[in-house]
Image: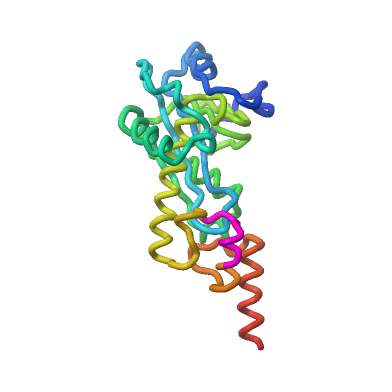
Amino acid sequence: MVPAAPAPDAGKAPSRLLPTLRVERALRREGYLRIAGVDEVGRGPLAGPVVAAAVVLPERRLRWLPELRDSKLLTPGARERLSALVRRSCEWGLGAVSAQVIDQIGIGPATRLAMRRAVLSLPEEPDALIVDGRERLEHRARQHPLVGADARCRSVAAASIVAKVARDRMMVELDARFPGYGFARHVGYATREHRERLSRLGYSTAHRLTFEPVRRALAGVAGAERG
């Protein structure tokens, strides 16, 4: 593993900042040609996988690139449209880690594992990574961790969109497998609806048993069984 390169500007991202290609261009000037933006979604939910994406933007200009944003700032319709454009025009890879593995190794290692899987699933190996946050991945590429990179770098914004759309679709599938929890609506996050359903229905195998609200539901079931 190559140690991550220092990121002197890896502080808090300024608000209302639009993603640019500044970091990607700086890396290209250093001689790196295959630069992948890497981001994840799903660290905080009580259920479902953590999902990561890696995206290598082409060097040619694409007219929709200025529309890329942190996925959280886009409407569902805009995310779907941009995800389709990214997947059609760019090199991309996905990685996911299940709730069961999250419980086994913890959310931090699971997030890094999902990111690594996304990078490894790219059609060709990248020689540089721009990673959202402070994560350092097991990969020999030159790494540039950057807090708020999904709001600052277009390749990472693209990765955030692809990961978000992919995970939302996975949660719709889980909603069909485990009806009653509302996974398709809250996508596993700890909304009031989700907590109420969890208290009433108990946990499912899609839930992360080490997360506190789920542990409480598990304790309630155990208490009912003892009673």
Residue at 54% across, 69% down: 203
Q: Residue at x 53, y 23 (%)?
A: 19
Residue 134 placement (x, y as % from top left): 63, 35
Q: Position of residue 215 (x, y in %)?
A: 64, 67
The quarter of the rendered structure image containing the N terminus is: top right
- Answer yes or no: is residue 125 visible: yes
Q: Residue 21, relative to residue 72: is it above or below?
A: above
Quadrant position of residue 131: top right
The quarter holding residue 174 reads bottom left
Front position in the image: 138 or 10: 10
Q: Residue furthest bottom?
A: 227
- The residue lying at 43 percent from left, 28 percent from top is 126
Q: Residue at the spot x=41%, y=53% of the render?
A: 170
Residue found at the very far top of the displayed protein: 29
Q: Is residue 119 visible?
A: no
Please provide percent x and percent y for residue 205. Answer: 49, 67
Provide the residue span drawn in magenta.
Answer: 188-196
Left or right side of 147 for 114: left
92 lies left or right of 48: left
Check residue 161 for magenta coloring. no
Q: Who is closer to the viewer here, 108 or 3?
A: 108
Q: How many marks can you see?
A: 0
Hey, which quadrant is residue 224 in on the image?
bottom right
